[in-house]
Image (cartoon, coloured by chain):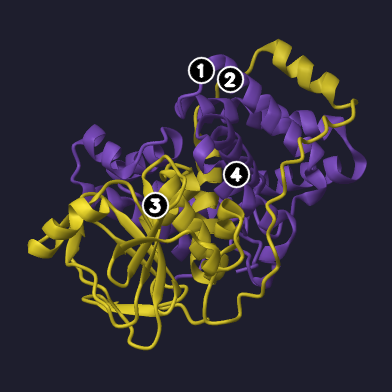
Chain colours: A purple, B yellow
Amino acid sequence: MTDSVGESVDARHWISCMEQVAKQRCKQSFMELFDYFSPRVNAYLLGMGADSGLAEDLSQEALLALWNKAHMYQSRKAAVSTWLFRIARNLWIDRLRKQRAAIYELDEEYLEAGLGAQDPDEDTGALDADKIQQALVDLPRNQAQVVYKAYFEGKSHSEIAADTGMPLGSVKSSLRLALQALRVQYGEET
Amino acid sequence: MNIQHHLQPETVVAYAAGTLPAAMALVVGCHIERCEQCRQALRSAEALGGHMLETVSAKPLSAAARDNVLALLDSEPAPVPTRKSPSVKTVSNSGPAFLPQRLQALLGIDSFDQVKWRKLAPGIQKFNLPLKEGRSFLLRIGAGLAMPVHSHKGSELTLLLQGGYRDELGSFHAGDVADLDSSVEHQPVAFEDEACICLAGMDEGLRFKGWIPTLLKPLTGL
């Protein structure tokens, strides 16, 4: 599973940018990350219901976190996009879903304190962006739509069912299959 | 600890996406403190989120925002508002009972004895957690006692913290989670040897069946 042949060039490129930022405080690498990721974080936050002003503020905050916490990033554990997704999601929760903040905050502390290190083989972030891509391309259109609504519109399972006219059970099995497809691609089918 | 009952994958996805109501997110968060399998599933689900981030159609920020960020790189990072670090004790949860760090932090307790239990019915006690999204509570069921048969209007997550129970779905021990939807009707019966403590989180209320609940309901507000 650590075979790097299938690794996406992009994923590796972003990792080396992160290394430049962490070790050299390289602004050029950071701005490259900024120009690629900030419009995507912005789109994510808008999709999750932030108004345009807040989305712009939080996007800047998310990318600045990437600059300030670059030394904590571990490429072995997560792709840059995964790390940033987590940062953006936690900012969204912190600002718009306050009730949930304390729960996720501790998750963050676990990761940062390396307490999750009790999982020595936790290589699930193993960066096979190409493989993820393939797993998702192979998903039937309605499943892909369910995944999108779950992650990028912040919809609950029953809201997705109402939106799409799919039965609740199908919504759940779509998400289950998407995650399963991903994990099979990771070679860690349980 | 050997965990037998895990979260449904779609529940893990909802947690990764940040969309579970607080009452349910708490149960998920507590379970993953103990469960490596579900923690790995969560990392995969977050990788899926990361991938979605790469494929979404971009909406650029204003030029001013870019300049602003660039200008901030040279300044000292704004002091991160140090939150009151949850007074989490590094209790080794090695004993049979499992008091998750999230619960310790949320309630400021380091033992179930400190919970302000309210009597619900003979041998059954409850404590409502101060979360406003969904409903969540701790339940303490005396050794050998049965809960009324019930199903749920929405989804229910139950995490076993001490002792265990048996129901139509099997045996549940500390660390196990029951991830149920409205199609499931069950009647947990606590093991004979010890009181059972569990943390439940749900998006909506319970639906009881039969006469016991009609009796219990006004009494308990369950």
User: Which kind of residue does numbered mark 3 sit on?
Assistant: Ser
Identify the residue shown where x is 82% and y is 48%.
Answer: A71
Decide if residue B50 is on the left or right side of residue B148: right
Indicate the secondary structure of the residue bearing disc 2. helix
User: Which kind of residue does numbered mark 2 sit on?
Assistant: Leu
Residue under numbered circle 1: A51
Between residue A97 and residue A21, name the one nearer to us.
A97
User: Which kind of residue does numbered mark 4 sit on?
Assistant: Arg
Decide if residue A130 is on the left or right side of residue A22: left
Residue B10 at x, y percent in the picture: 37, 54
Decide if residue A140 is on the left or right side of residue B175: left
**Vertical comparison of A58 with B135: above or below:** above
Binning the other alpha carbons within 10 Å of mark 4 as few (below 14), some (14 to 19) or many (20 upward) gives many
Indicate the secondary structure of the residue bearing disc 4. helix
The chain carrying label 3 is B
Residue depth check, mark 2 versus mark 4: number of the one nearer the observer: 2
Q: Residue furthest left?
A: B210
Residue depth check, mark 3 versus mark 1: number of the one nearer the observer: 3
Judge if badges 4 and 1 mark residues of a common chain: yes
User: Which kind of residue does numbered mark 1 sit on?
Assistant: Asp
Identify the residue shown where x is 53% and y is 72%.
Answer: B98
The chain carrying label 4 is A
Name the mark on residue A54: 2
Residue under numbered circle 3: B136
Do the numbered discs 4 and 1 sit on residues whose CB atoms are within 8 Å?
A: no
Residue under numbered circle 4: A86
Do the numbered discs 2 and 1 sit on residues whose CB atoms are within 8 Å?
A: yes
Judge if badges 2 and 1 mark residues of a common chain: yes
Residue B201 at x, y percent in the picture: 38, 54
Which corner quadrant holds the C terminus of chain B?
Answer: bottom left
Identify the residue shown where x is 12% and y is 57%.
Answer: B214
